[in-house]
Image (cartoon, rainbow, N blue to C red):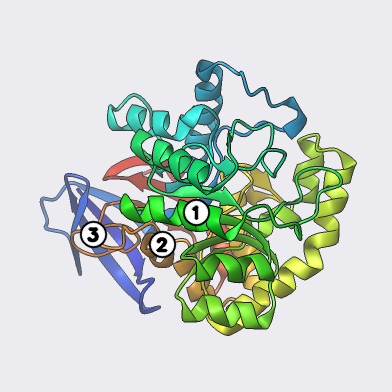
Amino acid sequence: MWLTNCHVVDVVTGEVLRDRSVHIDNGVIVEVAAAAPADADVHDLGGRHLLPGLITCHSHMSIVFPFSETREDEPAELTAFRAAQRAADALHAGVTTMRCVHEQNRIDFVLREARARGWIRAPRVFGAGRALSTPGGHGEGSDCVYVKGADAFYHAAVGELEAGADHIKIFINSGLAREGEDFEHAEMTDAEIAATVKAADEHGAYVVAHAGESAAIRQAVELGVRSFEHIYALDAETARLLAEREAFVTPTLCVTNSLGWMRDNHFDEGSVVNAKNAIAPHQESFRRAVEAGVQVVNGTDVPPGDRVDGVSAVVHEMYLMAKGGLDNLRVLQAATVTAARLIRAEDRLGRIAPGYAADLIAVDGDPLSDLGAMGRMSFVMLEGEVVREDVPV
């Protein structure tokens, strides 16, 4: 197949290759050419801009809203139906790869297997299985693995890795999810973090940390954690440290900037107030990360295919990143090449180039000059298969 009559956005250089055709075979990009052969099987994109499929790095497909309705003894079959629908919604929104960072019943592994067998259409999944939490800590009541002490954290991490985890999720701070919570309370010791990192290193994986404030982030980065979520209160010194260590940050700006969505999903007013009060420090923390040159990636926490302020959550996150000072190219990179580097798939995902997966989206307009074009997405391809086309061809 050839995709023709499109403008290819190079998310590495920021160039737009105008009037190009892209040859795809067996789910992989073969070449980007000036034109397709006369006898080629073509799909005319009608002058739309073509980009790599989006990679979102903080997803929960199994989460229940409001959180108070979560049942830790929920049958896996129910979790699977909910997660499969969320995954389908994410794919429709242009998400072709997602990193899950805690799923009830390890449903990310189930999605990955069902997708591999061709039973569902879903983004490819990089999964954590269940997050590791301390008794009474953040994530309590959501089917985490609850442990205390370095040995227990080590063995719990090994358990998730041997079950199929690509990375391990921990909570080094509390959060905003429940009334009365704050993100300044440390929840893990140095020994517990180090033991988790050791388990991940031994299995060729890495650790993802739910992280609210700077002291805990500095503690964790010194102990080998490479991926940090949320950063609600990040100071300039810690931002520079993250940049120096080439760590990654998933700011999840959606968490504090989706108040209407929270109310629509029946969050208690205390949680809404928590989020609202964190907007200003969260945005300022993100600006510090941008100014320091930290590698930032797209991740929503909100299901990426959910509608927030008129667009999908994954696109809403893009708009929030731009509002926070990230230029349009880096916003696109955060959901493509930088995200691919975080999940260690930069050799096959996140670019439009020969040898890369034919995971592609098309939008009306040039998102490098008008990021609003991302809200005008009308085409999604996953591994060479057209899974969404809104324009009659």
Distance, label 3 to label 2, CA atoms, is 26 Å
Instruction: Find disc 1 in the rendering and name its residue.
Output: 57
Contact flag, marks 3 and 2 (Cβ < 8 Å): no
Question: Residue 317's spot in the image, x, y percent?
Answer: 61, 59
Tag 2: Cα neighbours inside 10 Å, few (<14), some, or many (≥20)?
A: many
Residue drawn at (60%, 83%) of the image: 291
Disc number at residue 319? none
Foreground tag (1 vs 3): 1
Q: Quadrant of residue 254?
A: bottom right
**Horizontal relation, residue 362 to residue 353: left or right:** right
13 shown above or below 279:
below
SS for callout 3: strand
Whichever of callouts 1 and 2 sits on the residue coming sooner in the sequence is 1
Q: Which numbered disc, 1 or 3, marks the residue that appears first in the sequence?
A: 3
Residue 120 image offset from top left, x and y in percent = 38, 27
Residue carrying label 2: 342
The answer to whether residue 325 shows anywhere in this view is no
- Labels 1 & 2 near each other (Cβ < 8 A): yes
- The residue that appears at 56% across and 61% down in the rendered structure is 228
